[in-house]
Image: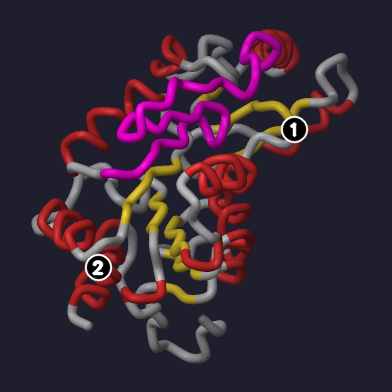
Amino acid sequence: MTKQNGNDLLIPSIEDIDMIVFDVDGTLMDRDGMPPGMVGLMKETESRGVTISLASGRTLPNLTPIHQALGLSGFIIAENGGVLWDGPKGQKIELRANGERCRESIEWIATQMPEIDPLGIESNRWRETEWCISGPHDINAIRELLESSQWSDLRVVGTGFAIHVTEMGINKKTALEIMLPRRNINPNRVLSCGDGLNDVPMFELTGHSIAVDDKYERVSSAAMSRTTRMGPRGVIEILTSLNAR
């Protein structure tokens, strides 16, 4: 699929893709949840032979009910690539990093930036490979502090919903490079959809990519196309067009 030129949404033919990988927050759902029709379109897409997987900064316990409620047959990439699970194929949960150092780094940063709560967001109680804090905070200041500390090997990623501290090399792209071969799926036959900076790495890997928001120029530029409607309604736009062909 070539890069979008103008305002027309470029969507591959359903015969040209084997899998769609969706981000969750800001993509499949927003603060109002999922729009009407989402579940039906997901099931219709899967019934036509396209596997749907999830790749999110959420924890696995947060993502599993969403995966089950949508009736998906694909895998789950949680914590921005730190946790992998292909339950439908019977694979065990795989952890790619140790979140203890990430937590320790945030505890130290909180001593330098008292406005930061080192406990972070509520879902940290289930987080295993990274640590998250809610914003707004100066993400560049956090990066500078880490770079001059014993945790200089860690990276800071802002998603729009939270600020994640994780190990280098942990992202959605490297996670897909592990998971797709296990399914014998060529990345060129994958459509990835997202809205945040943490989605850019997977856009770089997959043969097709669509952004569902324009709030980040880097995200829109990295994707091959962008929906007319934003967030979950952009996903409705994608799936409706895909299944109309």
- Crowding near pointer 2: few (<14 within 10 Å), some, many (20+)? some
The label number, if any, that marks residue 239 in the structure image: 2
Q: Earlier in the sequence, mark 1 or mark 2?
A: 1
Q: Quadrant of residue 155?
A: top right
Q: Where does residue 160 sit, x and y in percent of width and height?
A: 49, 44
For the residue labelled by badge 1, is the local secondary structure a helix, a strand or a loop? loop
Residue indicated by mark 1:
168
User: Relative to residue 44, is residue 226 depicted above or below?
Assistant: below
The magenta segment is: 73-102
Q: Quadrant of residue 32?
A: top left
The answer to whether residue 29 is magenta is no
Q: Where does residue 115 sit, x and y in percent of width and height?
A: 60, 18
The answer to whether residue 95 is magenta is yes
Furthest-front residue in this view:
184
Measure how far apart labels 1 and 2 are at the Cα level.
33 Å
Residue at image position (22%, 62%) is 45
Looking at this view, is 208 or 114 the one in front? Answer: 208
The label number, if any, that marks residue 129 in the structure image: none
Q: Where does residue 93 sit, x and y in percent of width and height?
A: 45, 21
Amino acid type, mark 2: Leu
Residue at image position (51%, 81%) is 1
